[in-house]
Image: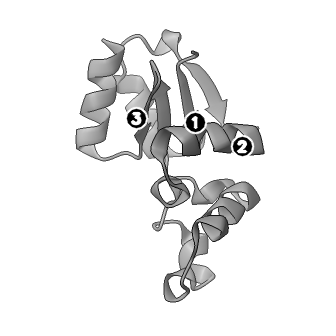
Amino acid sequence: MTNKIYYLASCDTCRKIIKSLPNADRLVFHDIRQNPITVAELEELYALSGSYEALFSKKAQLYKSMDLKNKALTEDDYKKYLLEHYTFLSRPVFIIDGTIFIGNSQQNIIAVIKALS
């Protein structure tokens, strides 16, 4: 299985995290703006995470501007929005040796660094 990072090249947080990674050359980089996530890729992320909601960023500006927090979203809704616009993916998402790491929490990044070491 390929070790991969889904990220946004224009995101300062993503760039900072990538700089801090050991063995980053072992990752396949996937810029989600330049190369939007396919249904198959999203299905793989879903299979590893167990939920579209887990992959969904509730910090996205579009989430606020579309007033989605006041809607009862289903897993199908989360999937639809994730495929519609890259900003809804909680970034970065790593797949390392079959394990998924979602988001930029310090705890998550420590786990990613450990997995890559």
* Residue 27 visible in the current orientation: yes
Against 40, is 5 above or below? Answer: above
Report the residue marked by disc 1. Answer: 6
Residue contact at pointers 3 and 2, CB within 8 angstroms: no
Give how far apart the Cα atoms at labels 3 and 1 are.
14 Å
Against 55, is 25 above or below? Answer: above
Q: Can you tell which mark lies on residue 37? A: 2
Q: Nearer the viewer, residue 62 or 71?
A: 71
Residue 90 position within the rendered picture, expressed as x and y whole percent measured from the top left: 49, 52
Report the residue marked by disc 3. Answer: 16
Quadrant for residue 97, please give it.
Answer: top left
Q: Is residue 16 left or right of residue 29?
A: left
> Looking at this rendering, what residue extends furthest in the bottom direction?
70
Q: Residues within 10 Å of mark 2 (few under 14, many from 20)?
A: many
Q: Is residue 34 left or right of residue 63?
A: right
> Which secondary structure, mark 2?
loop
Please name the residue shown 30% across and 11% down the image: 117
Q: Amino acid at mark 1?
A: Tyr
Residue contact at pointers 2 and 1, CB within 8 angstroms: yes
Give how far apart the Cα atoms at labels 2 and 1 are.
9 Å
